[in-house]
Image (spheres, helix red, strand yellow):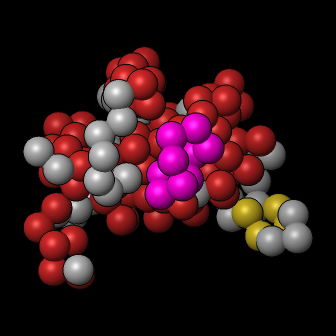
Amino acid sequence: MTNEQRAEKLVQELGFDFDQISKDYIISLLEDEISNFHEGSSEYVRLLCGYLYCLGNISDIPLLKKAKYGINFDVGCMVDSEWIDSLENGGVEVDLGYIVRSRDEIIRDIVNYYKDFKASDLDDEY
């Protein structure tokens, strides 16, 4: 199964009702992926980090940084540093020399990107 297919399956399984998604489950999946990274697209790691951002708080920054900076360059490019910055600044919009959007805006973008996510749609882009 490709990383895109794994991402699609997880979205179908969990959806986006963040009150119902277990943060511990996401952390467990992310820690496992960091330890046993599946080569190929980094979409699955990006999705896990997106979920953790949506569920998380400042205590989750070290794990997000480990995923972003500790696997490989491709993963680092896929995991948005804005998510880390937002958790560090409490989720408010702020200008750090670049604009970090509000947490609500970032979550909305993550959900909009993944809500109709299909691995087969990515095949058409390449």
Q: Position of residue 21 (x, y in %)?
A: 34, 29
The quadrant where residue 20 appears = top left
Q: Quadrant of residue 65?
A: top right
Name which residue lies at 82% across and 62% down: 94
**Is 73 covered by the magenta stretch?**
yes
| Residue displayed at 68% across by 25% down | 59
Position above or below: 85 against 34: below
Residue in the picture at 73% in, 50% down: 85
Asked if residue 66 lies in the magenta stretch, the reply is no
Question: Which SS does the magenta portion mostly show?
Answer: helix
Q: Quadrant of the N terminus?
A: top left
Position of residue 12 in the picture relative to residue 14 (left or right) = left
Percent x, y for residue 116? 21, 64
Q: Residue 47 or 115: which is nearer the viewer? A: 47
Q: Looking at the image, is 97 positioned above or below residue 28?
A: below
Q: Position of residue 44 (x, y in %)?
A: 32, 47
In depth, the one of 17 and 26 nearer the eye is 26
Q: Residue 93 at x, y = what percent?
A: 76, 61
Answer with left or right where residue 39 lies relative to residue 48: left
Magenta-tinted stretch = 68-76
Residue at (32% x, 56% y) in the render:
41
Figure check: 94 above or below 19: below
Along the line of sight, the residue nearer the viewer: 68 or 36: 36
Q: For this view, does 100 lie left or right of residue 39?
A: right
